[in-house]
Amino acid sequence: MKQLCLFFALAVLPLSPHAQAQAIKLKVSDNKRFIITDKGKPFVWLGDTAWELFHRLNREEATEYLTTRAKQGFTVIQAVVLAELDGLRVPNPYGEIPLHDFSPEKPNEKYFEHVDFIVNKAEELGLVIGMLPTWGDKLYSLFPGAGPVVFNRKNAAVFGEFLGKRYEHKPIVWILGGDRNVDSLEVLEIWRAMALGLRKGDKGKHLISFHPRGEASSSYALHNEDWLDFNMYQSGHAFRYNKVYQYATNDYLLRPTKPFVDGEPAYEDLAVRFWADWDWKDALDENGIVKDRSYFKRGFFTAHDVRVHAYWDFLSGACGYTYGNNAVWQMFKKGSKPIIACLTDWREALDRPGANDMQHVRKLVEVRPLSKIIPDQSLVYGLNKNDSTHIRAAVASDNSFALAYLSVGQSITVVMKKIADKNIVAWWYDPRKGTSSKIGEFTNAGLQTFTPPSSGEGNDWVLILDSASKKYPKP
């Protein structure tokens, strides 16, 4: 079996001061549903989109950002080497651009020393960098960006090998793409060349995925590519109560089986369908912060929205979920020009409620192990609409527990006997606080209705049903 491993070595690059002899390996699980450690434990992909991290933050700011996210329980930081926001022309905080003469075969050592610093700091804090070699606008696309287009097959392979060698022993997952789909056969060949270059450079030590445009999955064009270790979809920013479970179900049923991650769902503090309200300059104050929210007719995505999408994803079979905040992805600073109108600057955004709620998501899928979760909608009795009242459910592979997420505190009628025991213990888990309360013990037969402690928008709950004989700890 092909073993594709991600190495966490606290000091293999000479520039890292943190030396340890032992490396921890990550790989795709034997059943191809999850990412696991070399000890067989599941790795929970809890990501953050920090696309402009390498490009816009200095070392002190990057340290502040990474330290905060590590404390909040995040495990993966997604960032771009050749950045979206005119990253080939606009220098980093130290006046450096990534390439000489716009050539991927001529990387600027000074620029990459800054990338090195951030990668090493992430490693020190126990974080993985989901590293995008480039944003997708540096290749031909039906949706061109700042660009310029600089890649062809030859230099993509060279650039991939350069990155692979440089970060061979670092905590990296490679993410190709960058908000673009595969829009031609030539583009497909360029991505293949880059992937093979990465493999050659890092000797196959890191996993590879692909970040597509909104409302698409890497599986649509690349599922059968040998170099694609797991799929990533971008469920996007178009809807509240987005049906992320539809992307998950599609990728879950594909063969060969591969893990999958929602790599870009709706961002907290982003205007819903932001592109429909683009002329927002008069809605900003002197610092570039939104002062008139009424201009944005559809409102902004909230902490509740990001929780809904996270739990819907995980209970639909995803091995990971990536949180995002509108100010953080662009590293917006007061007084500068936002790319998309922001409610705060990046620093204030770090402590937004949705970001802090992600630690509770991780807690739940660790105490009721993610590696056992199998989507099972048959747990839910009765009509289950595809709207805000939609319920996602899952049952453990050994039938020792079941989970159901109630996005607006709606009642649920459960088909019992999904748990392999005469009696079950039921709990309410609060996704806002990470606390739980025991409902009681029930005979495992027939139908049973459960009504959460509160209901309405912002009052989401997780119902946990445990086998009584397993004596699971309080979640």
Image (spheres, rainbow, N blue to C red):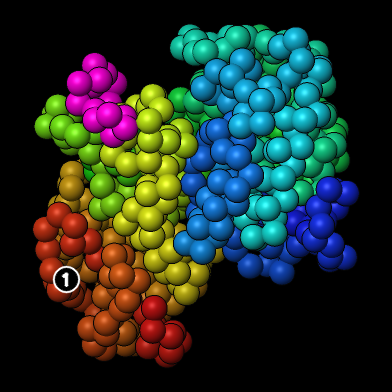
* Residue at figure coordinates x 24%, y 87% from the top left: 440
The number of callouts visible is 1
The amino acid on which the numbered mark 1 sits, given as a three-letter code, is Pro
Where does the image place residue 453, in percent across and percent down from the top left?
15, 73
The C terminus sits in image quarter: bottom left
Q: Quadrant of residue 332?
A: top left
Q: Where is residue 266 in the image (x, y as percent from the top left)?
A: 34, 39
Please indicate whether residue 261 sits to the left or right of residue 388 in the image. Answer: right
Instruction: Name the residue nearer the viewer: 20 or 248.
Output: 20
In depth, the one of 198 and 56 nearer the eye is 56
Queried whether the magenta region covers residue 282, the answer comes back as yes
Q: Quadrant of residue 114?
A: top right
Horizontal placement of 226 versus 182: left or right? Answer: right
Q: Does the magenta stretch include residue 194?
A: no
Is residue 12 rendered to the left or right of residue 444? right
- The magenta span reads 272-289
Q: Mark 1 points at which residue?
A: 452
